Amino acid sequence: MRTLILSSIAAIALAACSQGEEKTAPEAAAPAATADGTREAVYAAASEGPEPFVRALYAQYVAGGPKGETPAPGQDPIYSRTMNATIGADVRVANGEVPSLNYDLICNCQDQGAFTLDNVTVGQTDPNNATAAVVFTNAGETTGQTLKLVREGPNWKVDDIVRSDGTSTQAETIKVIEAAGG
């Protein structure tokens, strides 16, 4: 069953990559070092490298939270094809109910308060894979998590988020999908 689920997710991911162009920032966008907390700054930083990408992701929260229209579940350019496939499947198996991923994955929260990015440590394991250990404080609560990053084409994407307790978002979501028979 697990092989079938993973094969289905892979097929969805491959299909998703051919459903339109990936969002990219305009060439004249500001470098991530001056990220203004917008989605456009995140998209621009995705091609600069794993650390600028992660810093731009969290700059949104430091600036008061993500602005603009949020992409539909399973179609967010900040996530890898595989992560988008699992997010989309999680919503589908919820069948109109609240999905298991009913919170903001990047800040690991439902509600945002005063937000600071306390530490980012990035390690690149090869040209197309990296991890970012992130520590941040949201509404007075300090949290750590690890973002597993993958390069798809020229852009870095979040492929998984491992919470401080060691729980993989992608693995937990796959369990939910399997349990639902999806």
Image (tube, helix red, strand yellow):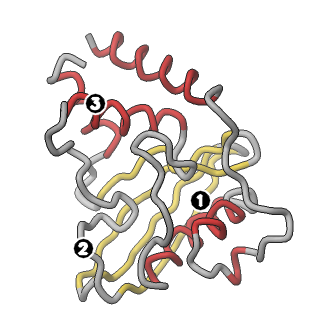
Residue 118 visible (yes or no): no
Residue 92 image label: 3
Q: Residue at x 64, y 54 (%)?
A: 124
Disc with the residue nearer the chain's start (3 vs 2): 3
Local packing at callout 1 (Cα closer than 10 Å; few below 14, some 14-19, many 20+) is some
Amino acid carrying label 1: it is Gly
Q: Which residue is at the front of the view, 49 or 77?
A: 77
Dot 2: within a 10 Å radius of its alpha carbon, few (fewer than 14), some, or many (20 or more) residues? few
Q: Quadrant of the N terminus?
A: top left
Which is nearer the eye, 60 or 137?
60
- Whichever of callouts 1 and 3 sits on the residue coming sooner in the sequence is 3
Q: Residue at x 25, y 39 (%)?
A: 172
| Residue at the disc numbered 2 | 111
Residue 26 is left or right of residue 32, and the answer is right
Q: Nearer the viewer, mark 1 or mark 3?
A: 3
Q: Which residue in the protein does label 1 denote? A: 123
**Badge 3: how crowded within 10 Å, few (<14), some, or many (20+)?**
some
